[in-house]
Amino acid sequence: MKRKDSALAISFMFAAAVMLLTAGPARAIKFVSHQSYVEEHNKGAAKFFKKAFALSDAELALLRDKCNIKEPEKTQSFILGRTADGKITGAVFFITIYATEHHCKHDMGIALGPDGSVKDVTITEVECEYAMHCTSRSFLGQFAAKAKAFFAFNEDINGVTGATFSSRAITDLVNFSIAAYKAHVLG
């Protein structure tokens, strides 16, 4: 009888462990490394540089309140590509969005041309099922397809059904990166 009880207890513990492992937070799915994203969007660059900049109180408030970033780092940076003669080939801005309504996060990269125009927007890593909808080229491709200095959500950029908070935050972050590039890199 004891052997049967032991086997039952072990089976129960195994089932409980499986339930805990599968019911936990979603595992992150990494789509592209930061290094390969920087290299892909800075063709012709001979060297890469990190341009760090301190955020103003207004920029911190914007990231916190409008872009859905809980505790933004006070210092952000662009990775700049430069030709052998020093001309900027482009810049990449990486940032993490914390979707507070679903308690998950996703990392994104925004590639800008030398003039600050959007070359590409991508989700580099995601651990939120709601944000998965925002990884589509049909959504992210809208930014590079339009040569604009500012994107209005639901006017210039169509949001993603089922991921409204994430698609709005992504739009706000693209706008933030364009403004930050112009203020802190082009000066």
Image (spheres, rainbow, N blue to C red):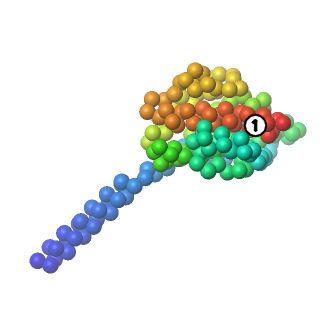
Estimate how packed mark 1 is, as few (under 14), some (14 to 19) or many (20 or more) residues with alpha carbons within 10 Å. many
Foreground pick, 76 / 90: 76
Left or right relative to 81: residue 66: left
**SS for tag 1?**
helix
Above or below for 119 versus 64:
above
Q: Quadrant of residue 31?
A: top right
- The amino acid type found where label 1 is placed reads Tyr
Q: Residue 145 appears at what percent x and percent y?
A: 63, 23
Residue bearing mark 1:
181
Q: Quadrant of residue 177?
A: top right
Residue 37 seen in the current view:
no
Residue that lies at the very extreme toward the bottom in this rendered image: 2
Q: How many marks?
A: 1
> Which quarter of the rendering shows the N terminus?
bottom left
User: Residue at position x 27%, y 67% from top?
Assistant: 13
User: Residue at position x 32%, y 59% from top?
Assistant: 18
> Which quarter of the rendering shows the C terminus?
top right
Above or below for 149 versus 54:
above
Above or below for 19 versus 39:
below
Q: Residue 40 appears at what percent x and percent y?
A: 67, 38
Foreground pick, 142 / 33: 142
Foreground pick, 122 / 148: 148
